[in-house]
Image: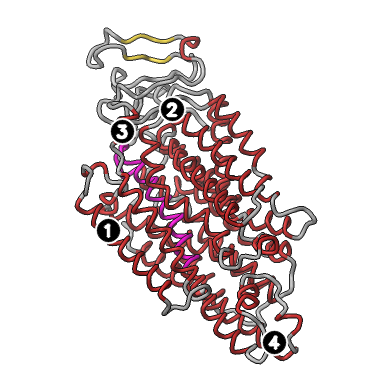
Amino acid sequence: MVNEHDLELSDATDGYVLETLDDPATSEGNRLLSPGEHDGWIEHDGSSLGGNPLTSAYGDSAREGLPTRQKWRVFLIANGLAALVHGYGVTCASNIEGPIHKDFRSINLLPLVGLTYAVVAAACIPLACQLVKICDLKVLYLISLVIMAVGCILAGTARKIDCVLGGRAIMAVGGSVLYHAMSINTIYAQPNELVFAQAWLGAVFTIGLAGGPLIGGAIADSPHTWRWAFYIVLPLLGIALILFVIVLPRHRVQTNKPALTWFRELDWLGNWLHVGTFLLFTVACVSSGPSWEWNSHSAVGVWVAFAIMVLAYTGQQAVNLGIANEGRIFPWSLLRSRTVFLTWVCTFCAAGACSIVLYYTPIYFVLMRVHSRLDATSRLIPFICAFVVSTLLTGGLIGYIRAYRLAFMVGAALLALGSGLLHGITPDTTDHAIRAYEAFIGAGIGTIWHLATPVCALILPAERHLDQAALQSIAQFGGIVAARSAAAVIYHDIGARLLKEAVADAAYSDEDIRELLSGIRSTILTETNPDTVVLVFEIIVEATARCFSVLVIAGVVCFVAACCMKAEELDFWDARKKLAAPPPGDRRNQSLPI
């Protein structure tokens, strides 16, 4: 039987909330608040948590007794809009690289246009996690939305490619903090609701992620400027801002110190080392080969700098240099959990596979099938549909299946199967076959994409939920960065070497070859004799297939990790699995339905 003195309970019928005023061990300080006294979302700072930073004064769930069902739904809709824009920001520039290159003619920086958002988002995740812990979440939400809007405007009004990169970076900073702040779902949702909430966020983030190339392709082929790819999200950000102002409660996770004190005590050295590691890795992968020869001083220097940065970052976190053990920005201790580590690996692999399919498949169709950008990107629709449907199905069915290991294994198997088939493409492979392979991959990725969060929420103490959310964000965006960077090395290195040999007799520059590999229809395809064009097509298929080898690796690693998980079942529907069930007919302890 739940001790009602330990929890602040909501009567869903009468609208009364039991407030604990004095010693929770007695009943003398308890009184019922009338509906008028707790209308809507009650603001709180969690000061009565008794040492648990994630459990509010309202008991096991900070949302219990706080919102009406309508406001909870509006809150989820606003979160969905924000997640949609964040996902769109990752990929929206991938299909407008051609028009951007036409305006600015900067082939060396062009690969960074599509990568900048994911790199900066991954680099900012640890800091975002710390800000979520110390700042008022409502204020953080609103400021993040404004930052994203500023980045969109800067990228859209850019007069040189550096401003496009800067605008994309600013968007990513706001998006990273905003997306991590959405881990507030672990505070306001019961475990059974968390499954749905994470599936919802995963689905809309996926739609944004997959819709970026579609919208970018449509804009690239239209008479409108590529700048609308950035302007188009401003109304969505405005709507989300208004909704959050209306329904989002005030909440601070950490309350035993002032926010300014927490801010001064942040692990700033660790944050800068984390940022430097991601930036140097991306620059090293993108520039080595296309911009710098592998044995050049620049290429060697940046790889050495990256190695030093990794060692410094690892050492600083290992010995807690300048910080207390609990102040480390990366929650290393969570990876000691077998379930957390293996679900992290699966999420990392799924995110990497997703980024490769979304970026390189349209390039393949543009060059091999002579499609427009929009036509080429429309070939991703089977992938997108399978991704979204499998994400929602997993979120809806995992509560009944309960065996999360089985879900991960099915998703990983589909990913590995589709990756192996896509890796084996030839110039004679039909469009229908490729789209079928994409659907297998999309179904596998969607099954895995957001499953780790509700699984880990049930096995970890509440105070570690935000750290686990940071781990999953790093897995998603780190996977995107790592896979795209590794694939770029393989694709451009092999493609450039073979193309130079194929057109050695013609006076084509390195820039012409790089334009072709970037999906920009180069003069190589129009001015070269037909026999050479056929050879060029074969080279493109070879380079793309080699690039898809990263997909195969991701699928195999993901499946092995899934097989190594515990063969256990989790009760996702029991919102109070650690407490006794309430008596029949007593609905005060039950969470509000969605």
Question: Whole-percent x and y of residue 316?
Answer: 24, 53
Residue matched to label 4: 534
Residue type highlighted by circle 4: Val
Q: Which residues are magenta?
A: 458-485
Question: Whole-percent x and y of residue 134?
Answer: 36, 33
Earlier residue among tags 1 and 4: 1
Q: Nearer the viewer, residue 558 or 252?
A: 252
Point out which mark residue 213 bears. Answer: none
Earlier residue among tags 2 and 3: 2
Point out which mark residue 312 bears. Answer: 1
Dot 2, crowdedness within 10 Å: few (<14), some or many (≥20)?
Answer: many
Residue type highlighted by circle 2: Arg
Asked if labels 4 and 3 touch by Cβ distance under 8 angstroms, the answer is no
- Tell me the mark number nearer the camera, choosing from 1 and 4: 1
State the CA–CA distance, disc 1 to disc 3: 24 Å
Residue type highlighted by circle 1: Ala
Residue matched to label 3: 262
Q: Is residue 59 above or below residue 331?
A: above
Point out which mark residue 63 bears. Answer: 2
Residue type highlighted by circle 3: Trp
State the CA–CA distance, disc 1 to disc 2: 41 Å
